[in-house]
Amino acid sequence: MNIILLGPPGAGKGTQSAGLVERHGMKQLSTGDMLRAAVKAQTPVGIKAKAVMDRGELVSDEIVSDLIDAELEAMGAETGAIFDGYPRTAAQADSLDEILAKHGRSLDHVIELGVDEDALVERITGRFSCANCGALYHDTANPTSKEGVCDNCGNTEFKRRPDDNEETVRKRMQEYRAKTAPILPGYEARNIVTRVDGMAAIDEVAGAIDAILG
Ligand code: ADP
Ligand code: ADP
Ligand code: ZN
């Protein structure tokens, strides 16, 4: 099974990917996470990507498609892939088809998480994650059960992304509208798109996704 989670920043792609990994043993392929790891490790890709990410713009298609290709190369053929935050442009959507074919895979579902824009800003500005295991939280919508302690691993340090501020979020939404939303019709023509209400509670969204995967 190979699926794309598609939606604007803050729609819940990372949160739902984590649930799918846990429930179905799939692997999350998040280009955002891969790029942040490259920035942290100060690799040539990371050094190039950092300023672009801080502005809320998109890094080059070639960089992200190469990252995805390398991850699929390293994965067992039987493990399902969740594409989170990729593809984000028409060129990336074309590359994904080629990369999947090369690895003997094909796309089963594109799940579109629909959310209102006002809610997105609030989600992004309240987002934080565990500095140890990466578990995702939100100040009000999804806090840790015990204040200051990660539910998943017990760690007490958390972090916030430098690009999770209102100004950058607006730019990221513009990028989504201009470059990412236009890839949907191509997938719709292939009859593989299902829209899920991303404004519902996290476990309800998870239930809707599981119903699609069958
Ligand atoms: P994305 O990966 O699409 O950018 P995330 O999964 O990181 O989005 O979610 C953004 C923020 O919104 C996080 O702080 C997360 O805890 C919170 N969140 C995710 N899904 C929901 C939901 N269904 N309802 C309320 N808050 C949510
Ligand atoms: P979110 O889901 O909150 O929008 P991501 O973690 O997916 O954020 O992406 C963070 C940033 O990394 C993006 O704003 C962009 O600069 C870069 N990025 C991630 N994935 C891609 C991609 N597929 N194409 C181009 N840039 C990307
Ligand atoms: Zn943790």
Image (tube, rainbow, N blue to C red):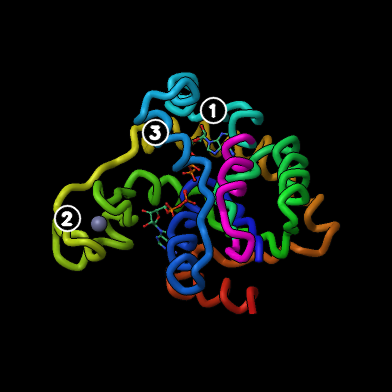
Query: Ligand 1 lies in which image quarter?
Result: bottom left
Residue sitting at x 25%, y 61%: 143
- Measured from the top left, where is residue 81 in percent x and y? 59, 58
Mark linked to residue 163: 3
Q: Which residue is mark 1?
A: 57
Quick one: label 3, few (<14), some, or many (20+) residues within 10 Å?
some
**Quarter of the figure with residue 64:** top right
Under 8 Å from ligand 2: the CB of mark 3?
Answer: yes
Q: Earlier in the sequence, mark 1 or mark 3?
A: 1
Asked if residue 119 is among those painted magenta in the image, a careful observer would answer no
In space, the residues marked 1 and 2 are separated at their CA atoms by 32 Å
Give, as a single range, the part of the protein colored magenta.
66-80
Under 8 Å from ligand 3: the CB of mark 2?
Answer: yes
- Measured from the top left, where is residue 63 in percent x and y? 59, 29
* Quadrant housing the N terminus: bottom right
Q: Nearer the viewer, residue 24 or 139?
A: 24
In space, the residues marked 1 and 3 are separated at their CA atoms by 10 Å
Amino acid on which the number 2 mark rests in the picture: Asn
- Measured from the top left, where is residue 126 in percent x and y? 32, 49
Under 8 Å from ligand 2: the CB of mark 1?
Answer: yes
Q: Earlier in the sequence, mark 1 or mark 2?
A: 1
Mark linked to residue 155: 2
Asked if residue 74 is among those painted magenta in the image, a careful observer would answer yes
